[in-house]
Amino acid sequence: MSGQNRNDRSGLGNYELRFGNAGQAIGEARRRNRLHNWPIIVEGPRDRRALIALGFTGPIEVLNRGWTIERVVAHWYETYGTRNEDAGGSSVCLLMDWDRTGGRLQRKIANLMQSFDMLVEQETRTVLLKNLKPETRVVESLYGMADRLRFYINKEDRL
């Protein structure tokens, strides 16, 4: 049995559908980021670079800046508040990697933000996790996938 058939059985073989779903989620996030000053929060500078390659022009915040997580979350609370009604309600989009470490960070940061009563969007990460996990588990890899994803992203967010 070929590898493609095994992937089809697990529901991961439909490239167009998976990349379409991922591109739609990224395109929606990019539109909200650009039009409504809606920050995307990532782990490090390479993640930021990947989002810029995908056409993000609004705020992209980096977690790893030499501060404690608690201090960074307090800074984001002071900067972005608890809600952004123009962007659909949530004040930020939390986009940690979808590997084990990223999952731990996602939960910890989301819990801290929620303790500040911040509404946090996490659906973008969930969609990427479900649709891109066979290809990648980290945000920075989106840089190398930018050309393949851009078609799907631009269908959702026409620049």
Image (spheres, grey):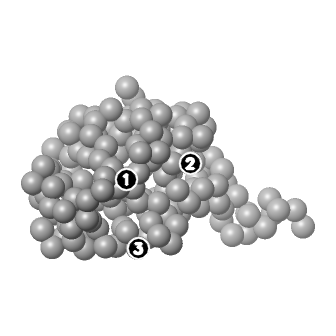
Contact (Cβ within 8 Å) of mark 3 with mark 1: no
Type of residue at label 2? Ser
Q: What is the x, y in percent for residue 122?
A: 34, 62
- Residue annotated with mark 1: 42
Which circle's residue, 2 or 3, is located before the other in the chain? 3
Task: Using the numbered discs, state the Cα–Cα distance from disc 2 to disc 3 in whole angstroms.
Answer: 19 Å
Q: What is the x, y in percent for residue 141?
A: 56, 48
Quadrant where the image shows the N terminus: bottom right
Q: What is the x, y in percent for residue 52?
A: 42, 35
User: On the image, which quarter does residue 111 sit in?
Assistant: bottom left
Type of residue at label 3? Arg
The residue drawn where x is 41% and y is 45% is 45
Helix, strand or loop status at disc 1: strand
In screen coordinates, is 101 left or right of 35? right
The residue drawn where x is 53% and y is 45% is 142
Task: Using the numbered discs, state the Cα–Cα distance from disc 2 to disc 1 in whole angstroms.
Answer: 13 Å
Looking at the picture, tell me which residue is in the foreground, 60 or 30.
Answer: 60
- What is the crowding at mark 2: few (fewer than 14 residues within 10 Å), some, or many (at least 20)? some
The residue drawn where x is 59% and y is 41% is 145
Task: Using the numbered discs, state the Cα–Cα distance from disc 3 to disc 1 in whole angstroms.
Answer: 13 Å
Looking at the picture, tell me which residue is in the foreground, 125 or 116.
Answer: 116
- What is the crowding at mark 3: few (fewer than 14 residues within 10 Å), some, or many (at least 20)? some
Which circle's residue, 2 or 1, is located before the other in the chain? 1
Type of residue at label 1? Val
- What is the crowding at mark 1: few (fewer than 14 residues within 10 Å), some, or many (at least 20)? many
Mark carried by residue 104: 3
Contact (Cβ within 8 Å) of mark 2 with mark 1: no
Contact (Cβ within 8 Å) of mark 2 with mark 3: no
Helix, strand or loop status at disc 3: helix
- Residue annotated with mark 2: 141
